[in-house]
Amino acid sequence: MKLENKTILITGASSGIGSELARQLARRRNRLILIARRQELLQQLVQQLPQGEQQHLLFSCDVADAQQVKDVCEWLTSSSVQIDVLLLNAGVGEGFDARNIDLDTFRHQVDVNFFGVVYFVKYLLPQFIERGGGVIAATGSLAGYRGVPNAAPYSASKAALMNFIESLRIDVRRYNIQCTLISPGFVKTPMTDKNDYVMPFIMSTEKAARIIIRGLQRGRSEIHFPLRLSLCAKVARLFPNRFYAWVMQDSRKKIGKRVDG
């Protein structure tokens, strides 16, 4: 699928990878449906895009709230908006202290990173099935491959997402629906700007968005980057559990600890 003259829904569109995807896709003459919690940032973004609010739709919506997602999806369906691509990109990452687990923070990360994808799939997948095709892409993380230090909620939510997309791909293959998992490493965004540790091979949002768009057009089942870091993450899945734990604990000591959330 060439991502030109399509209708594309993007969650987490107010900043980071989501906003850069919006900019690049708008230049390709796509109609965008932009979704995020921060209405003011969405309005600033849409004013920068070709044709602005005349061409694109924006919704203030907390993807962790099932009712809010349902309301947006029902409005789109009742308005006969036919979506070609779902870019379910919203995500959050916060610190984790195993000695004092904050259940609210843990639950919030799972709600946004995992259920924030599930809700949109629930309410919009029937439209794709009825039309006989479409693209569903969700932003996971290389941190979903294996557990990483001081990030249990983030890593667990991304691992759940990874398996959800893989299972969904099997179930909807008969309907000509492409399911793609996006697995980035470190990308310079407001979320990673909070980190005080070394982030190897960190890349710009501009480059990340170009890689994602190219991978979607090529029909990739997974888009993982940067290559060197993603290959290391894939190889690490083969490590024995005790060896992997020792390596990661040692690396954490060398590059510095994450600030407690």
Image (cartoon, helix red, strand yellow):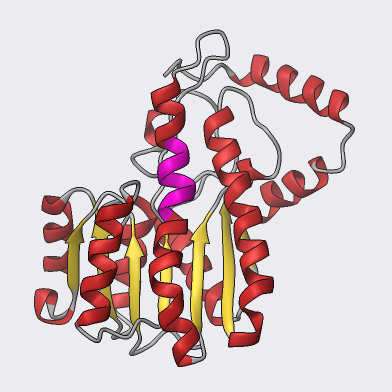
* Above-or-below relation of 191 to 257: below
Q: Is residue 225 visible?
A: no
Residues 30 and 78: in front is 78
Name which residue lies at 27% across and 75% down. 32
Q: Is residue 37 magenta?
A: no
Q: Is residue 189 left or right of residue 253?
A: left
* Above-or-below relation of 58 to 177: above
Q: Is residue 113 magenta?
A: yes
Q: Is residue 52 visible?
A: yes
* Above-or-below relation of 211 to 97: below
* Location of residue 261 by image quarter: top left
* Above-or-below relation of 55 to 227: below
Name which residue lies at 35% across and 76% down. 8
* Location of residue 247 by image quarter: top right
Q: What percent of the width, then of the height, locates residue 7? A: 32, 82
Name which residue lies at 18% across and 66% down. 58
Residues 161 and 214: in front is 161
Residues 207 and 43: in front is 43
Q: Which residues are magenta?
A: 109-116
Q: What percent of the width, then of the height, locates residue 138? A: 50, 61
* Location of residue 143 by image quarter: top right
Name which residue lies at 46% across and 74% down. 125
